[in-house]
Image (cartoon, helix red, strand yellow):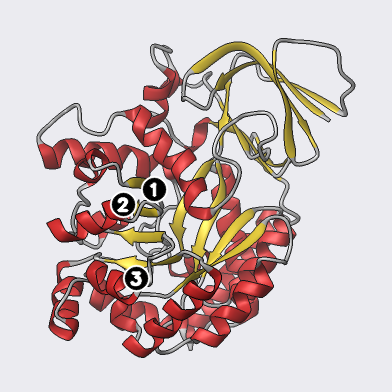
Amino acid sequence: MIRFYNCKILDGNFNIIENNELWVKGNKIEYIGRAKHGVFEREIDCKGNVLMPGFKNAHTHSPMTFLRSCADDLPLDRWLNETVFPMEARLTDDDAYYLSKLAVAEFVSGGITSAFDMYMFPHAIAEAAKSTGFRTAICGSVNNFTSSAPELEENYDKYNNYCDTVSFQLGFHAEYTTDISILRDIADIAGKYKAPVSTHCSETKKEVAECIQRHGKSPVELFNDLGLIDYGGSLFHCVHLSGRDIEILKEKKDITAVTNPASNCKLASGIAPLSRLDKEDIRLAIGTDGPASNNALSMFREMYLATALQKLQTEDASALVPERVIEMACKNGAYAMGTDNDCLAEGKLADIIMIDLDRPNMQPVNNIVKNIVYSGGNENIALTMVNGNILYERGEFFIGEDIEKLYGKCTEITERIKQI
């Protein structure tokens, strides 16, 4: 059992509780409260720092680390067709395995304890998660070019019985890359399992306009009419939504709208109407998107942009307050992934991070939650625990890989792909 003591704890209501301690037994939180007797394998003095639930990266594409700073300064359609798709065609399963591990290193050093990962090569992503101990919910990425509805169902069965840090959800890449016949097949699978379905949705004006040309309705309306979202799911981006789209999302209580503000800024896609969605009680979560369109995998940057862009868009400095953003980044992302790690409470999965307050950007400590959102950064992550195991602590990685060798391997992969 591991004991954290002399710590502040961000509780389930996102309030700071002073002078507590937290015990971890196996992969669960065993105890939270005042000091009492116990027998421990390790005792960690938090020195007044904050323990909080880890960030949930509710939309990403981990193996795309090889495209970091290779596919820049283009709008989404050209970015995909001119750079991303041609280079992705050269990837192997083995490449995706190591590139995913590199993303895991970036995740844990930034306080991310689980990711909702959509990409080809689900086996590579699952193996990377298993070998590093990182929690990953894999999202199906069916489209006209890779995978299929039968393979999606196969993966649903396989990876939901794989290991305790890996799960799988039904999903497809996007309306514009997936024929209507395939979407109908996926809707049938969702109905069979009464399972959520997730996808990219309404990321750009062009995407929405072309969907209306093809089907006479927006992506959200199409998904609703096909029965794809009858059992919930996550819609990634949700930048360009009509009034009717928002009504549908409100009606579907199990839908999560996942915002990716840094990627949407970089690709000039627009600003998602988070304040309006929040007022309509539509569940919101936050993701980084992939390292090709971001290019970092930092939830601190996403949280800041989520609130700052809403203030700018609505011309209201009180829009989307930090407490709400923390909830999006921690609790709601867990809901989207279907994992029991939404808060720090006895019996919950031990996916925990320690925020180092003894850094210049956290001083003075007037309001910890506001500091985390408005001035926090990866440098404030002192420790990241996933499933009861410490994967990162003050600059050291414990993910089963020599970090320098991992960097070298991923550089080799990238150079080979660029030279083909």
The residue under the point 20% across, 55% down is 247
The residue that mark 1 highlights is 286
Residue type of the residue flagged with mark 2: Ala
Q: Nearer the viewer, residue 53 or 87?
A: 53
The numbered disc on residue 36 is none
* Residue appearing at x 19%, y 26% in the figure: 318
Residue 126 shows up from this direction = yes
- Three-letter amino acid code at disc 3? Ala
Q: Position of residue 75 (x, y in %)?
A: 21, 70
Of circles 2 and 3, which is in front? 2
Please report whichever mark, 1 or 2, sits nearer to the chain's N-terminal start.
2
Judge from the rendering whether residue 395 lies leftward or rightward of residue 398; answer left or right.
left
Q: Nearer the viewer, residue 417 or 165?
A: 165
Name the disc covering residue 262, or none.
Answer: 2
Question: Is residue 74 visible in the rendered structure shown here?
Answer: no
Q: CA distance from mark 3 to mark 1?
A: 22 Å
State if disc 1 and disc 3 touch (CB < 8 Å). no
